[in-house]
Image (cartoon, rainbow, N blue to C red):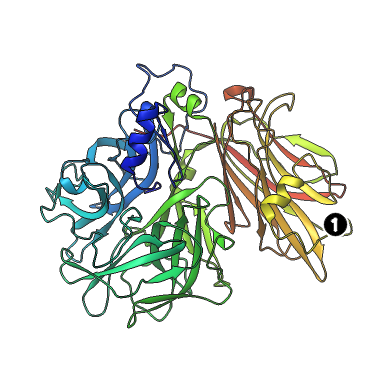
Amino acid sequence: MATSSHCLLWFFFSLFFGHGFVPLEASHQVYIHLQNQSPSSLKTHQPYRTGYHFQPRKNWMNDPNGPMIYKGLYHFFYQYNPHGAVWGNIVWAHSTSTDLVNWTPHKYAISPSQPADINGCWSGSATILPNGKPVILYTGIDPQNKQVQNMAVPKNLSDPFLLEWTKLPQNPLMEPTTINSINASSFRDPTTAWQGTDGRWRVIIGSKIKRKGLAILYRSKDFVRWTKAQHPLHSGKNTGMWECPDFFPVSINSSTGVDTSSISKTLKYVLKLSLDDTKHDYYTIGSYNREKDTYVPDKGSVDNDSGLRYDYGKFYASKTFFDNAKNRRILWGWINESSSVEHDIEKGWSGVQAIPRNVWLDKSGKQLLQWPIAEIEKQRIKPGHMSSRELKGGSKVEVGGITASQADVEISFKISDFKKAEVFDESWSNPQLLCSQRGASVKGGLGPFGLMVLASKGMEEYTAVFFRIFKRQTKYVVLMCSDQSRSSLDNDNDKTTYGAFLDVDPVHEKLSLRSLIDHSIVESFGGGGKVCITARVYPTLAIDGEAHLYAFNKGTGSVGMTTLRAWSMKKAKIN
């Protein structure tokens, strides 16, 4: 759950002084007086609602929860406020799909009803038992506002829609006590469980002790009675609270996904953490010792907030699941807002989900690759391709014939002359800062070149996704940026610029970029999914039919545009 505990003292303090705002150690803030404030009717004109990204019809949404496939249907649960466009009143909302693109909503799967969750049903995961039965472990908030772990099971296993869920009367199954010394305000978000060779189940839960982040490990023989292990699966000094942990295997020699309980010598393991301090998802790749129940990151896999990220933009509280129908591992992630709370309430909703991504281990073994699920390509219509050409310095060319506010575009570049590449300064260790200092309007040698999306006709507004190439001794460094600084004339929005270094050799490889554009979302994939950057933007001019799309080069050196393919995207059925 992407939030921290509800401290009653804060609640009373806030209410006593009439502010109605509670600061938390959280990825969002609590506005008590706004939790039940929802417009009587949604605005007719909704230029920022998505066409093919998942979101409910109205109100607040955050973490993806318990994604799974059951009897041929994909199930997606998510944290939801039924009564307003800010965080609060949290339940598990539920939708199903046959293709992960078009979704049918159902009644809430889990809502507060027991002492073990009476103050909230927070995030968790689904596990498919060997007999095919799905179970959900989730965090509940009890009457003392302690975070405890509960279980729910389907009432009718013959129902492929899993419309009704029953909570165990034994809840909570795991809870902080004076004996285990678990932090009662930082003990949440159980993972999908996995089964060891001894037949016992394991699950980890995010926690912390002061500034030390923990993946607390529990074991069980029957999935009901759980025992805390003497040591965590893994821990990290000075990393703060570990929210929404995820732990899963990946194949060393195949892009095929594997079940969470798989056992093989050809597997590596991924531990993903949502760091409450930074509000970003980080992961390491390493080894899992089944005898000791410990995880050790590989050498060079950085185990803190300077490490690898799923996404270098707006993307948090992510969750994966194994799709056994297509033998792939699918990643969901919450795209949080860049608009103000006032704007969220005005438009009547907040938060969307990223397009589900297929995730697998890169052939280098050092990072993951991510790519939008193939099903999303069925939404493509009205292609607007462009022949290869040279983009000279200072040029831009419009991509016509498509709906630029709801599009999918792929472009690739080939560099033949590197003479104008600027020298890389070894002090440039922070790619996001470098992108902020050298945005799309700053002319360089090789770059910036890429795409200008959601651009207004007069270029008063645009979001630029681009590359820069620098020379570093005997090799070249590629910087990928998503520049939102000119995305909107409305300065109430968060217009942070994002960036990352892209591990591609531009001498021998093409530089590829794919951007999924969806009204207020720009979801970009560089280098075949080596770097992903998601942006939330709220233009005032470049909306609906007034949005434009350009390929551009503002560097002094020319670049070759080898391919450009673009499509309008059909509107998906989303709730």
Residue 553 percent across, percent down from the top left = 79, 43
Q: Is residue 354 left or right of residue 530?
A: left
Question: What residue sits 60% from the left and 23% below the top?
Answer: 545
Q: Is residue 38 left or right of residue 358?
A: left
Residue 157 percent across, percent down from the top left = 14, 51
Question: What residue sits 46% from the left and 23% below the top?
Answer: 347
Residue on which the image places disc 1: 422
Q: Residues within 10 Å of mark 1 (few under 14, many from 20)?
A: some
Residue 58 visible in image:
no
Closest to the observer, 517 or 21 = 21
Closest to the observer, 184 or 443 = 184
Q: Quadrant of residue 110?
A: top left
Q: How many marks?
A: 1
Question: What residue sits 21% from the left and 56% below the top?
Answer: 134
| Quadrant containing the C terminus in the rendered view | top left
Closest to the observer, 151 or 207 = 207
